[in-house]
Image (spheres, rainbow, N blue to C red):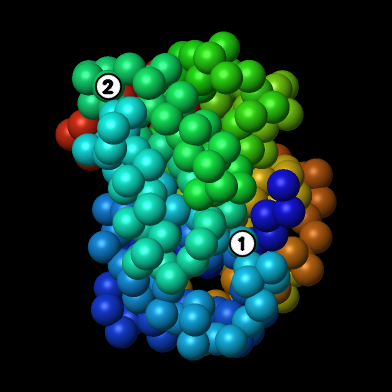
Amino acid sequence: MNMPAIGLGTFRLQGQTVIDSVRTGLELGYRHIDTAQIYGNEAEVGQAIADSGLDRGSLFVTTKIWTENLSAVALAPSLEASLARLQLDQVDLTLIHWPSPGDAIPLAESLTALAEAKARGLTRHIGVSNFTLAQLQQAIDLVGADRIASVQIEMHPFLQNRRVARLAGENGIPVTAYMPLAYGKVMHDPVLQRLAVQHDTSPAQVALSWLLQQGFAVIPSSTRREHLQANLQAARVRLSAADSAAIAALERGERLVNPDFAPQWDPDA
């Protein structure tokens, strides 16, 4: 899978704001755009992509299937609707956004429907998001690790999701870290501030570099051109083993995305 390690997230961005963010990001060199059905911005993301004039083959576009669309009869039609909004014939990666609340729709049904959508050419790759350790293991058991192109999870210095990331790594499944800047909280952490001074950069770049150096993809979002540019350059920051250990010590289980329909999270995730 040729997914660029640094992508542009669009969570919570709406209307002209998301159009401007994606358009600016593409101008700056982003080639990985992440959206979702529930974000309500697929049409705007699609407009920004179309307006860019970039060759489709140079872009990696991810969307996610919402919980209401996880059944065998609903999944493919919902993805077709996403494609229409995005003005694309195919997305590069489609994820199950959240496990079906209360397992109302069995994971086997959703994954089978997603695999069928892939076989039809609606998506190049499939994966999962917001899965617990047990749910990821179940997905692996159902379809095989080689068919899961990515697992997307909340991950930042204050919530490192180590158990899920370890299981993914042991099975060769790429991990994408969403909310990598913890809603901007990384900017105010003394350890990250100290490392930023040492490396003549920003705490945001330090946090992103820390994730990238572990082999994870990141999808930060921003509406400001200077921040979009800085995030894209995070790979240039090289942290030492001591730097990385200092950041790893910031783990405190601070989960920022925890809706009432979320699964029962792993105790030390």
Amino acid of disc 1: Phe
In the rendered view, would you say 269 is above or below 208?
A: above
Q: Is residue 164 visible?
A: yes
Snapshot quadrant of residue 200: bottom right
- Mark closer to the chain start, 1 or 2: 1
Q: Is residue 189 visible?
A: no
Snapshot quadrant of residue 14: bottom left
Nearest the eye: 109 or 261: 109
User: What is the x, y in percent for residue 37?
Assistant: 32, 54
User: What is the x, y in percent for residue 221?
Assistant: 46, 67
- For the point 60% across and 31% down, which residue is it? 148
User: Across the whole image, how many numbered discs are drawn on residues?
Assistant: 2
Callout 1: few (<14), some (14-19), or many (20+) C-alpha neighbours within 10 Å? some
Q: Which residue is mark 2?
A: 105
Nearest the eye: 66 or 88: 88
Q: Which residue is mark 1?
A: 60
User: What is the x, y in percent for residue 210?
Assistant: 67, 51
User: What is the x, y in percent for residue 9?
Assistant: 47, 63
- For the point 58% across and 80% down, which residue is it? 26
Helix, strand or loop at disc 1?
A: strand
Q: CA distance from mark 1 to mark 2?
A: 29 Å
- For the point 43% across and 71% down, which residue is it? 87
Helix, strand or loop at disc 2?
A: loop
Taking the image as shown, residue 68 lies to the left or right of residue 216, namely left
Do labels 1 and 2 touch, CB within 8 Å?
no
- For the point 69% across and 59% down, which residue is it? 4
